Image (cartoon, helix red, strand yellow):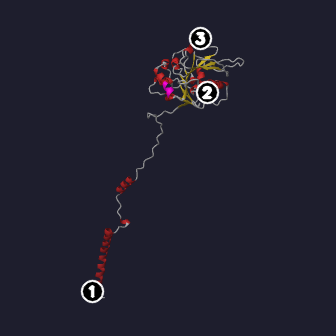
């Protein structure tokens, strides 16, 4: 090959070498303009833009909060305070002669089954005639120390043992309260607090007990004018509320003695039934007649003769009588406390 031929060949090689990059560049341009680019060639968006997109697509992670405690609202929207519960020592009650549920059958229990029956019949409308506020029952006596508080507790518990009735026992002897003490419980807020503290309702001071269907309303915080408060318009309004609001509940009042204070006479005007406790061989007949005269407006009066000695048995017990007025009867039971 001549030198000229070698030079031409060399020139063609150089031309081919220079033309190759140009062809490659055109091919890339055609792909960008007319064909989808390879995945590897797609430009990724800036990191900040991707983060913003992720934040918009997914909600921000929030640590789970503590669940709110369930609160039952009152009708006016305020939370209802938890019910106050007290435990009564039932074995102690049984040991001092008070009726208790599930205890072996006793004479005192049988006595109060008989005593409560006419009261329950009147509440159920099965008596001789209809009685207003028959579910409001006052337990009283002529003078202190005749056993009215002891009888109130026995009657209330015996009634609470009925299948169809709930019972509220109110210690209305605010000058000498004794219901909680007899039940072995410490003093609590109660009736006086409802009458003297604005905003305090009956439900705020009621005590639920471990005796099914029995609740308590204590006498409450001592007050220097307790006797006046018990005879006040506020007490009258409270009694009307009890009669209407708790018409399906038996309400037993342990009231002051009739001949010592006047407030028990005011209470008597609201009652449907009154149980008069009389201590055998102690209460004078004149005092009894005077006490009965103060409650003539009440249509039903039941008499309990406490500590009546049964000849031949050597034991004390309760007597009972019933009528539109008063009457006497006798029963037998183990020895009882006043």
Q: Residues within 10 Å of mark 3 (few under 14, many from 20)?
A: few
Q: Earlier in the sequence, mark 2 or mark 3?
A: 2
Segment tinted magenta in the rendering? 240-244
Judging depth in this view, the residue of 202 and 113 nearest the camera is: 113
Provide the residue designation for mark 3: 286
Provide the residue designation for mark 1: 4
> Residue 115: where, in percent of width, then height?
62, 23
Q: Which of the 4 image quadrants contains residue 123?
A: top right
In the drawing, what numbered circle is on residue 147? none
On the picture, is 50 further left or further right than 128? Answer: left
Residue at mark 1 to residue at mark 2: CA–CA distance: 140 Å
In the drawing, what numbered circle is on residue 158? 2
Which residue sits at x=69%, y=19%?
A: 315
On the picture, is 218 further left or further right than 30? Answer: right
Quadrant that contains the N terminus: bottom left
Q: Which of the 4 image quadrants contains residue 140?
A: top right
């Amino acid at each position: 090959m001549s030198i000229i031929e070698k030079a031409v060949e060399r020139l063609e090689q150089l031309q081919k070498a220079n033309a190759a990059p140009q062809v490659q560049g055109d091919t890339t341009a055609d792909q960008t303009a007319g064909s989808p680019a390879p995945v590897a060639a797609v430009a990724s968006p800036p990191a900040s833009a991707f983060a913003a997109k992720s934040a918009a697509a997914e909600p921000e992670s929030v640590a789970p909060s503590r669940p709110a405690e369930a609160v039952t609202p009152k009708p006016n929207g305020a939370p209802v305070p938890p019910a106050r519960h007290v435990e009564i020592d039932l074995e102690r009650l049984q040991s001092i002669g008070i009726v208790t549920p599930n205890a072996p059958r006793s004479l005192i229990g049988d006595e109060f089954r008989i005593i409560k029956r006419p009261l329950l019949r009147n509440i159920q409308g099965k008596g001789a005639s209809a009685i207003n506020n028959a579910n409001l029952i006052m337990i009283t006596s002529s003078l202190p120390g005749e056993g009215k508080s002891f009888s109130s507790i026995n009657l209330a518990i015996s009634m609470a043992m009925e299948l169809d009735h709930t019972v509220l026992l109110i210690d209305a002897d605010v000058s000498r309260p004794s219901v909680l003490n007899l039940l072995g419980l410490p003093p609590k807020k109660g009736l006086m607090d409802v009458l003297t503290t604005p905003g305090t309702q009956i439900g705020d001071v009621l005590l639920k007990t471990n005796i099914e269907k029995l609740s308590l309303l204590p006498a409450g915080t001592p007050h220097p004018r307790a006797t006046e408060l018990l005879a006040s318009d506020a007490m009258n309004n409270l009694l009307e509320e009890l009669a209407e609001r708790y018409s399906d509940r038996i309400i037993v009042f342990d009231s002051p003695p009739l001949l010592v204070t006047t407030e028990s006479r005011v209470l008597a005007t609201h009652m449907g039934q009154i149980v008069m406790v009389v201590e055998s061989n102690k209460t004078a007949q004149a005092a009894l007649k005077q006490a009965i005269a103060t409650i003539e407006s009440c249509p039903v009066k039941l008499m309990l003769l406490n500590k009546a000695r049964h000849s031949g048995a050597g034991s004390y017990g309760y007597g009972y009588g019933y009528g539109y007025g008063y009457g006497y009867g006798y029963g037998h039971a183990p020895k009882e406390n006043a």
